[in-house]
Structure formats: structure tokens, C-alpha cells
Amino acid sequence: MFEAIAFYTFSILVIGMFGIVVFSKNALYAMSALAGGMIFISGFFFLLDADFLGVVQIVVYTGAVMALYAFGMMFFDSTRDVKENIKFKKIIYTLSVLSAIFTIFILMAPIFSTKIEAIYPTLQGVGNVQMIGLILFTKYLVPFEVAAIMLLAAMIAGIVLVKVKMEETPTNIEVARGEK
Amino acid sequence: MEHILSLIVFFPLVAVFFGFVINKDSIKTFGIVVTFVEFIFSIVLWIGFDTNNAGFQFVEYVSLIKQFGVSYYLGVDGISLFLVILSTFMTLVSLIGLNIKKDIKNLVLTILFLEMTLVGVFLSLDMILFYIFWELSLIPMLYIIGAWGSGQRIYAAIKFFLYTFAGSALMLVGILYLGYQYFIATGTWSFSIPDWHLLVLPFNMQLWLFGAFFIAFAVKVPMFPFHTWLPYAHGQAPTIGSVLLAAVMLKMGTYAFVRFSLPLFPDASVYFLYPIATIAIIMVIYAAMVAYAQEDMKQVIAYSSISHMGIIIIGTFAMNAEGITGAIFLMLSHGIVSGALFMLVGVIYDRRHTKTISEFGGLATVMPRYAGIFGVMMMAAVGLPLTIGFVGEFLSLLGFYKVNWFMTLLAGTGIILGAVYMLVLFKRSFFGEVTKQENRELKDLDKREFAALIPLVALVIILGVYPKPVLTTIDMSVKKMINLMQKKAVLPDTRKLLIRVNSVGGTK
Amino acid sequence: MITLTHYLTLTGILFSLGIVGVLRRKNLLMLFFSTEILLNAVNIGFAAVSKYYGDLSGQIFSFFIIAIAASEVAVGLGLLVLWYKRSGTIDLDSLQMMKG
Amino acid sequence: MISPISVSIDSLNIALLAPMAILSFGALAIICIDLFAKNLSKSFYVMLTLLFIFIDFTALIGLNGPSRGFFDVMLVDGISVLAQGIILISSALFIITALSNKPFKEFKKAEYYALFLFMIVGFQFMVATDNLILIFLGLETASLSLYTLIAMHNRNKAFEAAIKYFTMGALAAGFFALSSLVFYALTGSVELSVIEKVLNARNYAPGSAILAGIVFMLIALGFKLSVVPTHTWTPDVYEGSSAPLAGYMSVVPKIAGLVVAIRFLDIFLHAQIAWVEDVLIFLAVITMFLANITALVQEDVKRMLAFSSIAHAGFVLTALMIGSTQANSAIFLYWVLFMFTNIGAFTMLWIARHKKNLWDSRYQHPFTKFSGMVKVSPMMATIMAIFMFTLAGMPPFSVFWGKLYLIGTVVDSGHVILAVIMVINSAIAVYYYMKLIVYMFLKDPITEDGNIYIANSSTPIKVIVGITLTFTIVASVFVEPILGIISTLMKSSGL
Amino acid sequence: MEKYLYVALFAPIVGSLFSLLFTAKKKNVITALVTSALLLLSFVSSLTLMFAVYDGLSLHVKMMGWISAGNLSLPFGFIVDNVSVVMMVTVTLVSSVVNIYSMGYMMHDKGYNRFFTYISAFVFSMLILVMSDNFVGLFIGWEGVGLCSYLLIGFWYEKESASWAGNEAFIMNRVADLGMLMGLFLIYWQFGTFSYEEVFAHVGSVNVGIVTTIGLLLFVGAMGKSAQFPFHTWLADAMEGPTPVSALIHAATMVTAGVYLVIRASDLFMLIPEVGHIIATLGAFVAVFAASMALVNRDLKRIIAYSTLSQLGYMFVAAGLGAYWIALFHLMTHAFFKSLLFLGAGNVMHAMDDELDIKKMGGLFNAMPYTAILMAVGSVALCGVYPFAGFFSKDMILAAAFNGGNFYIWFALFIGAGMTAFYSFRLVMLVFFGDKVYKKFGFHPHETYPFVLWALLPLGILATIAGFFEHPFEEFVTKVLDKYEFSMSHSTEVGLIFLTSAFVILVIVATIYKYSRGGFSKQLETMPLYLLLKNQYYIPKLYEVAIFKPYYALSKFAWKQIDVRIIDFSVDLIARVLYKSGQQSRKMQSGNLSDMLRWMIVGTVVLLALAIFYRPMV
């Protein structure tokens, strides 16, 4: 019962938050809603006995990612309402509806099997974090290291990109716009 | 003598590499020397050719991709021997007659490259190798037409290239499919033609494969209604391009019919005999009519080529030794004659920079020698006996008569209509008073032009009077091929037809 | 009783929301937000399936997806900053130099 | 409670990891060197990178046959080795082009080389596993590095390209994740081998879900392979990035994507799900057609080549659909041959790179730029023409053999109509390749100055062109051994 | 004797090649001398051969192989027998005379050397035609003479009408040649050979239908060469050529090739009397038809040309009725007197500065008496007045027609004979007698060179006396050809001869009387019949309107409409459609990131829809 209440509550909250992210005209609202949504998602993780994930979700997403976004936001000065010139609305609506229907239709179907044995079963009495650690450093050692490389690369990339000096004046862009 | 075929194929290519370092001023002489040596090689080939052996001779075989059955496989028989000689000879002659100063080095090297591909097409016994040369020959011709042509040259060059390339696209599928059939039948891949000759294909498959090959060949020949690239290509190409195009490249299509379509798909060939003959008749008559209506000298000859190719097709699909031998001989004769005619038009074009017939008139008065040679070639083109043109045309029609007399009659109208457009062309440009001031000052043929044309005239007469050594050599291989067709035919009707058209007597 | 289907349905809804965002957003930053939603939606699914099967692979996958999302943000924001410095806007209609 | 786990070093099969480890070490080394010694010459970095790639290659050569390691996460089989080989060779060819005549800022930065090496590592991981997680990680590592490499070209167009590529990549990543989720939900595993087993056991039901999973994966991989309709980034990104990088992108990410696609689709092709075949044929055909007809109207050579590489991908897709050993061999043969030619062609554009756009405000290499090139720079024109003819599948140059084998495979599998469509497409394609040749050979020169066409050339780049050209021309000789190697490796990996 | 054969055959071509060297050079008498000498040599050799043949020789040589393919093995073979040798002698004799004559006639022509080249080449071709031992060899000569005829008709190529006439002659002959070629094909596939000997040996054992077809097809060829209706128009137009050419080619030799063919293939035609009947009927028709056109024509040469046509009709009657030796005999005598007439006409033209209108002449007898005499002799011979050559041969034909019971043919020929008499003497009267109209037009006629006249003398003599060789000739040629048996009584024959002769002489006298009184009134010229005849029954016009112009229009249509508008257009259309669709598909690349993402999602949605709704049969 508790699970159901929690699920529905979180669901509504998350959908609402993400709805704001998608439909809001204000970037700040959108970002705040996104951050909120992330936090509520961690609620699901806790519900699903994935404590470690829940923590990571809050720390990484809400802590790091959203902070990054916030910094970016400051840089872009996006407190104003965003004017979006949306064309072909009908197409967008059709596509949105269709993709939603198909995706949900497929995921709603009972696709899971009951006969499957877990390959890396959760052991009774062992904490989630412990289990994760165990698997992460045996089975998923290589992916873990690759993730490290990826993060390193992303870091270097971020630094390099921001460091880039301007070579061309923005006139080309003006020209390109003028052509329209 | 063991590797003479490789030598013949690749000697011009090697020469191209040497040619890169040669100075512009000497490149034409270089080209002539190379093509002359090449011509000598081909003559040596003829001398060494065993005229009692109907099979492939001087065979060279190197496996290229074993797994996939692709090999480097060359050989020559009576059918291809003279087409090789024709290629080397016409290249030589056209180079002698060359009168272009612009980018001469590129041109000469391109022509040498072209020569390699032409010879390669006729000597390849591996289908993939054949396809390689077949496609490769388009590149130099594209360059020649596009770079040295006139007016609409780029349009003409692109049209030529795309049309022929697209045409042969389906053939590639056909080749691969046949290779696969061979694989199914024997467990090994092979694209070699002698191997394929052993392959007996079911009738339905023959039909499809015949169709796939047909389009490629038909575009090349060119057969109605795939012919429209030809007038453009000829109209815009420089003289040397037209000469090689008409003299050798068109023959690739008809050669391929003889070499592949007939022996590989005997039943389909017989099945499609009448439709193809109908197309050929349309070619003969229709092209002759269109030629008659032309206002440009070169276009007349271009369309006349189509008309003559129609006769070649008729002869090929006569399915008897007379017709096929005649068709092959007609390929040679048309090569020489149309080549010569294009050179002749080139001569006047060099002087007047126009090919419009109405610009001329009375040329016989100012350029009698030119008119004489033109006249000889014209007569050869209309198939006057004792010129080279008669033998092939006569044999082709003779052969087809056994298949169907009425169609032969229709195709035979080619000799009338051919006379119509040729004589009218001759009359309009050579006869009458000299009306244009520019034409009064024209110079008759110079030494260079003579040197190029006289051998052609000589050949036209010599082979017209004594074609026998050539004919017997061709005939031998053709008979072998017809035997093969009879053996391979899966339908009794096919065999019956082959026996009927190859025997004398009992005509209705 | 909340079953796996509930969670997967939620995943579908959230994923679709993300798609809708991708479809209609013209502001690059907010477009990036939408892609985050996509990944988060999948994360819920993984965690749910993981629970259902009692298998940890799903959680591990989620874990790595979070890492990937973080790296993407780093690179994406870098690019965005760069573009903003150039053009003074992060509207994606400004990215129209190349077309055709 | 957890019992202690003991793992023997042998069972890890460290050799499998060695190639990636070497490059990762190399990347770190480059960064460290940069910390201590500033202003090192770019030739130093290039050579260092080349050195690491070489070592990597030697480490790779020892590997063959399918072997797993690191708790079965790593899977190095024949196609993996082949793909890694192709990736490394292209990388080596690419990095040398950095030694251009004109200075470019990105090549002065150590980060460029580090990111480049990271990218290779990412691709190598991507092909050396059948675990979706590792595939995803490899993919992202490589992609993120690649986005940066593009952006580092430091032109407005480069940024635009990087952002477009990145955004679409992010969406594709979402689809990849969703597809993984679907299969995880279906089978409880993220390893392709297990997925296959479980699906087999479940008799491939429920159909819709499996197909949906395939769809999401197709979109995600299709993005990498530039399959219609996820191909839209390709021309813009190629146009925005530097020429050699564009050439690199048309080869390496695609081969990595192809390997994943081969592994993934193999499951369903084995099960003979007709839907997969049909959809792949459908995608291949529209990819070929759309790319080809759009390429017809391009005004810029680089953009034309972009569409051409989409079309080539469509070509290869047909073999993907067949999924036999022969077909997979055909893919690799085609790709090896295509690699040399395409890199050669893009390098030629790189050589012709100059500071300002001279003939078009937008394009660096409009067709008009090459007008009459044969008159002012005959050698260059001829080489370029050979590359164009090769891409067009003109015999006897390299790609022709690939095309031949590929179409042969398609014919063997009984898809004759598809083969016909393929050849029709290659006939259409001839037009746009020929357009460049027409400009180069048949039009009058636009400039007297032949140097404009070799403004950026240097000896190393010439060597690259020489290597690719040689390979392209005398491919007839190489095809047999290459095909031998490919077939051996392919058979050993049982695909 | 073989060497005589080769000498006779190749001497002319040697002469031709020799003078070919000079064609582009200035006039050089040596060409004329050499060719004349060689033609004479050929004549002498032919004569020698004739005597040898008379002594029983029959020469059959195979010089060398020519074509061999499949079952066909075709050599260059030559045969000298009683028939061919007659032709050889006739041809070489007339050609020698013409050649010598031309030395004077062409004296001032700038194409002097060229002329002799052509003439000798013609003789060579003609000899091949008559000497060949197979049908294809005959066809070689057949085409060869056609070519030379073309070249010689169009000899004065500056003249539009000349080159047009040349083309007409060549093309019309080609039409007929096609028929002949078809006949040859049929022969080959029936007999497996082209050799006369073998074909005739087996012809009896072959289905009559096939033989009939062969006969008809061969006759189509003969019709073209001998300008029988409806191919007759070229011959009149061929008069554009120099007059010696008309004499040699278009009177004495080439046009009779058709008759020769029928005679040569008599073994074949004998089996198919129905075809023979058709030939005879057509011949009779042409005899009258052509003569009627000659009645009103004012062109000196055309009159003689129509007369030639008419006489060819006579020959075909004989040949068609199986009286082969008579046909051959008339062929020979006709050669003599007709070439004589033409050459005489040439003299007149020369004197009159190439004026051809006989109404502008008159009273030329004083100026050129020898020519007038020679032409009168020729005319009398043509009319068939005893004892001139024409009498014997022509009356024999009439007799043969009567004998076969074909009275309508006989009657036609009888009328034709009357017409012949009329137009011949109309011509003689208008040209040589009466008022000297030419003075009005400022001509100064004069007699030609003596050597020219001397050269004509042999012809004049032969035209006079050749008839007396009737019996030796019959005996000579019937060794090869079938004898023709007259079944009617001798008295009927004599009666017929008297009837015809009387009629002819009556007409002649009447003509002379009428024209010495100033001829017919002008009003006659407005009569419809006159106009019909004057316009040659409107047949040339008909050809122009019904064949030439439509053909040209159709050709233009084929080119401009079908080739360019339809075929080429549809080819280009494919390219254009592709290019246009490229421009459309290009719009997909809008460059806008949103659109790119949307395309991606469109793809997803479409594929998902397929995943859900599309279930292929496995």
C-alpha cells in the first residue's frame, strides 16, 4: 500500500516536474523543475531497493549536473522568457502523440519473463551498496575503468572547448542569417 | 610468343608511363611509334595464330582471387583476332591523322590508354576482366569527348558515359549471378568464359540473364531505342574520338553478343531472335531515315553507323556460320569505313570549322583527291561489291535469309536507304558549283592526311577483293561456337532451328 | 500492488515527455534538459527490472548511464558556451550556416 | 554474507585489454608531457601518437580467434580484431595528415592527441565486447572525444557541426539506453550472447517488444552508420570538420557501428525473423537512393563526398541484412577498400585547403574551384580522378572489388532485385563523382596558379596520398590476401 | 587460252588505274591513248577468244577464292562460252569505239583524264558481269557498272541536274538490286552454291514455286538495270551524262545487262514459262510505252534514250518468250546502231554547243554531212529496214511473238515499230533537214574531227551488215542456249515480215513527207495526250510527290519528332527526374537541428509502426 502511494505520488510529481521542463517558457523554471524531477526520481530508486543509485542520483545529478547547468545558465543570461519560434506545430503534435503512444504501448506490454534466473542476483542480507561494489569491481571492472576514461576525456574536452580562442569574427553567422 | 597477349594488352599502358616524361613536341611521334609497334605485335599474333585451331590460343591464366574465382585470363580465337588487329590498326591510323595541338600530350596518352582497354576487351576470357576493360574504356573516351570536343562536348561526354555505364550496371548483376550458378553447379567459383561455356542453364534463367546482358550490349552497340547518346557523342567528339568510337568501341557491343549472349544463352538467343531482329530492322531503316534528314555531315555518318550496326545484329542473330561470320567481318569493315569517313569529315572540319552540309557544295572541284577518297569510302559504306563493305553485308543478310526472308527484305532496304543518304550527302557537299567564297581556297589533302587515309583505302579494296583468309579464320571459330550452341540448347526447338538455319536446301 | 508494468509505463511516459521536449525545444539548453529526461526515464526502468529479476546488472547500467549523462553535460555545455561566445545566442535556429 | 572472491590473473586474459591499455597510457602520457614541456612541436605529438598506435597494433596482431576475458565482458573475436585493425590503420593515416603545410591551431594542442587516443580507445572497446554496457561506454567515450575534435577545428562551421552532432548523438544515446532496457526487461541480461540464448528459449516472443527493441537499436546504430533518416547530420558535420577528420569519420565510427550492428543483428538474422530482413532492405534502399539523388545536386565536393559515404553505408547495409559469413566478409572487404580510397580522397581535399574561401562564401571546395585543374596541376587532378572513379566503383580500382563481392553476396542470397537496385544506384552515383572529374578535366581553368591546389601539402601528406593511391590502384593484387585474412578471421568468430 | 581471258578482263582495269593517277592532274592525252590501246587489246583478246570458242573451246577458270563462310565457298570464277564471248566482243568493241570517239568529244573537258578512268573501269565491270561463272560474280559486275554509270551520269557534277540524275540512277538500281539480292539468297539456300553450272544442273529437281520466285526476283534486278517500267525514269534522266557515256552505258551495254541475265539464266527461266510470259508482256508494254514518250520529246538524247528503252522491251519480249538467241542477237545489233545513233547525236551536240532541243536545230546536213549519214544509217537500222541490222533481229522478235500465239504482244510490238519509225525520222528530219533554225540562236555548227568519224565507221558498217550474220550467230550461240523453234509456216513468217516492213516504210515516208512540209501544227501541243506524253505520263512527278518528298518529310519527322522529341527526351527525362528529385530531397537537409531531430523521430515512429503493424510471412 505504502509502495503504491509512494509510486503514484512520485510519479505525479516527476511527470509534473518534467512537464514543466518540457513546456515551460522560462529556462530557470525549467532547470529548477528538472532538478526537482531528478530528486523525485531518486525516490523511485529507494523504493526499488537501489539505495546506491538513489544516492548517486542525488549527488551526481542534482549536485553536479544541475550545478553545471546553473553555471551555464548564468553565463547565458537566460532568466528571461525564452522565445521559441516553433514551426510545423501539427507535425510536432502528431509525432509527439504517435511516439508517445508507441513507446508506452510497447513498454506497457508484459514483456518480462517469469522464468529468468538472475545472473548477478541480489543476495539476501547484503547491502545494496556492497553488492554494487562487488560486481563493479569484478564483473564490471573494465566498464568502470572505461567510464573513468570517458569522464577524463569529457573533462579534457570541456576544458579545451571553453579555452578555445576566437579566430573568426561572428560576421559569418550574420551573413548566414542574412541569407534567410 | 607465350605472353604475347599480355604484351599486346599492357604495352600501351607501359608506354603511357614512359610518355609522361616525354616533351610535348615529340609526343605525337611517340604515340605513332608505340601504336605502330603495337600494331606489329598484333600482326605477329596473326602470323603466329594457328588457323586450324578453332579454340582459344595463346591462353594466359593467372588466378587473381581464388576464393571468388576471379582470374587474369587472356586468349584469342578467330572471332577476336581481327577485332584486336582492327583496334591496333585504327588507333595507329587515327594517331597519324591527328591534328590537334591543344594539350596534345594528354590526348596522346589518353589514346594509348584507350587502346589498352579496347584490346583488353577483345582478349579477356574472364568475365570480370572483361567487365573491367569494358568499363575502363569509358574513361578515356569521356576525357577525349569532353576535353577536345566542340560546343556541347560536356553534355555529350556525360551522356555517353552515364548511358553506357548505367547500361552495363545490370550486366554486372548478370555476371555475378552466372558466377554463382557455376558455383552451385560445380562447387567452385569461376568467371572464365570457357568454363561458363560448359554450363547448361535452364531456359527461364537464360531469359533473365540474356536480358541483363542485352541491355549493356544494346546500349553499347547502340541499338534502337538506346541509341541517342551516339549522335551527341559523335557530333561533339574530336575526329580521333569519333574514329575510335565508331571503329572499335561500338564493336565491343556486337562482339559481346557473339562472344557471350549466343553461346551462353542459346535458347534465350533463339527465343529473342525475332524481337531483336525487329529492333535491328528498325535500326536499319529508322537510322537510315534519320541520317537522311541530318544537316550535319558527322551526324549523317553517326546515324549511318547505327544503321550498319543493325545489319551486324541481323547477321549475328542469323545463328548460322554465314551470318555470324558475315557480321564479324562487317564489324571489321564498318570499323575501317566509318573510321575513315569520320577522319574525312575531320579533314574538312579542320579547314572550315564547320560540319554543316549546307556550308559546302562543289568540294569535288577544289579538293578532288579528298572527294575521291571520300567517294571510295562512301561506296564501301553503301556496300559496293569488291569493297570491304559488301562482303559482310552480303553474308549477314544471306545468313538471315534462312531465318526469315521477309525480315531480310526489310533489312535489305538498308542498302537502298544507305545509298540514299550517302549519295545525297555526297552530292550536297561535293557536287554542284562552289557557292561559298570560303570554300574556294580550301587545300586538298596534305601528306599527313594521305598517310592516314591511304592505308584505309588500300584495306577497303584489298579486303574487298580478297577477304578469304580473314573469313576462313573467323568462320572456323564461329562454327565451333555454333556447335557449342547446339550442344547446350535445352529446348528441342532451339536445336531444330539451329540445325535448320545451318543447312542448305528446303527453303520455302 | 505496483508491478513492473507500472514502472515501465512510467518509463514510457517520461521517455515520451523527453521526446516531446526534443521535438519542440528550440533553446539548446532546454533541449539538453530534455535529453536528460530520456536517460532518467530509462534509469527508472533499469532499476525496476533489476528489482523484478533480482539482478544487479540493471542497476549497474543505470549507474553508468548517470556517468554518461554527466560527461555529456560537460561536453555539451562546453560546446554551448563556445557557441554562445560566438553568436550571442543559444537558439538552435542560429545553427543554420550549413544546409542543402 | 559475501564470500571472498578469488580471481586468477590468467582468467582475466589481460592480453585482450592490452591494446586499449596501451593507448590509454599513451593519452595520459601525452597530457603529462604537456604539463611539463610546453610548446612542443606538433610533429612530436604526431609521431608519439603514431608510435602508440603502432604499439597498439602490434599488441593487436597477436590476437585472433574468439576469446573472452575480464569476466566475459571483453570479447575479442575475428571481427573485433579486424575492426580494430581497420580503426588503427585509419587512425595512423589520419594523424599523419596533421603534419600539414599550413598551421592549424588544433594540432598544436596536446589535448587534441590525447582526445584522439581516447577516442580510439572508445572505439576499440566498442568492438571488443558484446556487453551492452561496455558498448555504450565505448561509444560515448569515442563520441564525446570526437565532438571535441570536431569543434577544435575552431571555425564557426566546426562548432555548428559539433553541436548538431552532439545533440543528435544525445538523442541516439537515449534510444540506445531504451533499447538496452527493452532487452534487459525481456531477458534479464545486457550481454548479447545471453540475450540470444534467452530469446531463443522464449521462442522470440513477445514479437512487438523485441521488434521495438530492435527499432530503437537500429535508430541508435543507424545514427552512427548514417542510415536514413538519421543521416541528416552527416553532410553538415563533414562540411564543418577538417577534411581528414571527415574522411576519418566516414570510416572509423562506421566500422565500429557496423561491428556492433553485426553482433546485434546476428541474433535475429539467425532466428530468421523476416521483419528484420525486410526493414533492413527498406532502410538500405532508401539510404542509397536518398543519398545518391541528394548528392547529385551538391555544389561542394566535401558535402558531395559526405552524401557519397552515406550511400556507401547504405550499400553495406545490404550485406548486414544477409548476415552470412560471406556477407560479413564482404562488409569488411568493402570497408577496407573503401577506407583507403575515402581517406585518400579527403586527404586530397585537405591538400587543397587554403586560408580563405576563394570562390564561394560558404564552401571551401566548391566544384568550380577544381575547374580545369588538369591544366594547372595535372598530377593532382589525375589522382583525384582516380579516387573519384574508385568511389564510383569503376573497375579495376579497389572499391570495385568490394562492390563486386558485395553484390555477388547479395545475388547469392537470392536477392537479385536488391542487387539490381544496388547497381542502379551505383549508376546514379557515377554522375556526381563524374561531375568533379568533368570540372577537373573538361572545363577551362579558373586560375593560373596551381599552388592553390597544393597549398596545404607536405611530404607526410603526400606519402599518405601515395599509400592510399597505390592501394587503390593495385587493389586487384591485394584483394586475394585481404579476403583470405578476412575469411579466416570471420570463420573463427563464427559469424 | 586463259591468258587471253585475263588480258581481256584486266586490260581495261589496268588502263583505268593508269589514268587514275592523272585524275587530279591536268588533261593529258596519254590517258586516252593508253586506255584506248588497252581497250583495243581487250577487244582483240575477246575476238581471239571468240574464234577459239567457235572452234569448240569452252573456258572455265577459277582465279582465286573470294568469300567462304559456313557452307558457302565462293571463288572468282570466269567462264567464256558462246554467250559470254558474244557479249565480250560487243562490249569491248563498242567501248573501244566510244573511247576513241571520246578523245575528240572530251577534248576540251577539264575532267578529261577522269573520264577515261571511269570508262575503262566500266568496261572492266561489264566484263566481270558477263564473264562471271556465278551469280555473285555477276552481281559484282552488276554493281560495278552501276557505280560507273553513277559516276559518268554525274560526270559534270557541277550541274545539279547531272548529280541528281546520277543519284537517281544509282538508287533506283539499288531498289531493283535488292530484289536480285533476295533472289541470290534464295538460290544459295536452295542449292548451296552460286555457280551457274551447279545451280542449273539441279534446277530441274527443285519445286517449281521456288524456281518461279527465284526467276521473279532475278527479273526484278534485271528490270532495274534495264530500266523497265516502273524503274524506267532513271534512264531518261541519265542523259545528263556525256554523250559517249550514253552511247556506251545507257544504250549498248549496261542497260542490256538485264537481258543478259535472263539469257544467262535461260536454263532457269525455261522451267517457268509463266514468268517468261510476264517478262514478255512487260517488255511489250515498255516497247510501246517508251516509244510513245519518244514521239513528242524535243530533247535529242532523250528521244534516243526512250528508243533504247523501247528496244530493251523488244529484247525482253524475245527473252521472255524463250527466244534467247534472238534476244541476244537483237542486243548485239542494237548495241551497234544505238551507239552509233548516240555518238552521232554527240557530234550534233558538239556542233551545237551542247544544245539538245531538236526544234532549235534543222538543216544541219550541210554543216555535218558525214554525221548525218551515219545517223541516218543508225535510224534506218533502228527502224528495221532491210537490209540493215535491225531488220533481222527485230523481225525475228515479232515473229517469235506471233509464233508463240501471243498476238497482243505481237500487235504491241508492231505498233511500237511504227512509232519507232516515226520518232526516228522525226528526229532526223528536224535535226538535219528543213529550216536552219539554229541560225536564229546563233550557233555555228561544224563537222567533228575526222578521227572521230573514222572511229564511228566500224559501227556504221556493223549497223548495216550485222544482220547478215544471223545464221552463223544462231548456230554459234545455240550451242549453249536453247534453240528456238518456229512452229509457224515459212509463208506466214514472210508475210509478217512484209507486213511489218511495209508498215515501217510507210511510216517513214509519211514522216519524211510531213516534216519536210514543216511538221505538225502547234495546236497539237495543247492536246491532253500530247501533254501526257510530254510529261512522261506524269510518272517522274508521281515519284517526286509520292516517294521522294514524303520520304524526306518522314525522315525529318523521324529525326525531329521521334528521335529528338520522344526518345532522346525520355532518356533525358530520367536524368532530369533524378536531378529534380535530388533538389527535392535536398530540402530534407534544411540545416536546422530541430528538423534533424524530428527526422530521427519520424524514422523511429515509422519503424515502430512497422514493428507493431507489419508482420511479414516468414
Image (cartoon, coloured by chain):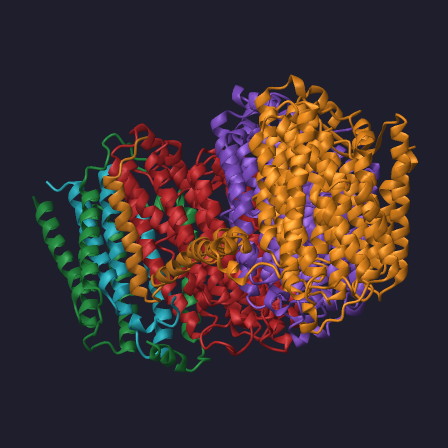
Visible residue check, residue E43: yes
Closer-to-camera residue (D276/D167)? D276
Q: Residue at x 49, y 50 (%)?
A: D426
Colour in which the image shows chain D: red
> Would residue D128 be found to the left or right of residue E214 on screen?
left
> Would residue C50 be found to the left or right of residue B77 on screen?
left
Visible residue check, residue E224: no
Q: Residue E88's quadrant in the figure?
A: top right
The image position of residue D456, as x and y in percent, is 60, 72
The orange chain is: E
Q: Which quadrant holds the N terminus of chain B?
A: top right
Q: Residue at x 66, y 48 (%)?
A: E508
Q: Residue at x 21, y 43 (%)?
A: A106
The image position of residue C63, as x and y in percent, is 31, 51
The image position of residue C27, as x and y in percent, is 26, 70
Residue A88 higher or lower than D261, as above or below: below
The purple chain is: B
Q: Residue A122's quadrant in the figure?
A: top left
> Would residue A153 be found to the left or right of residue B386 on screen?
left
In this rendering, the count of numbered labels is: 0
Closer-to-camera residue (D159/B292)? B292
Closer-to-camera residue (B91/D363)? B91
The image position of residue B111, as x and y in percent, is 70, 57
Residue D4 higher or lower than B320, as above or below: below
The green chain is: A
Colour in which the image shows chain C: cyan
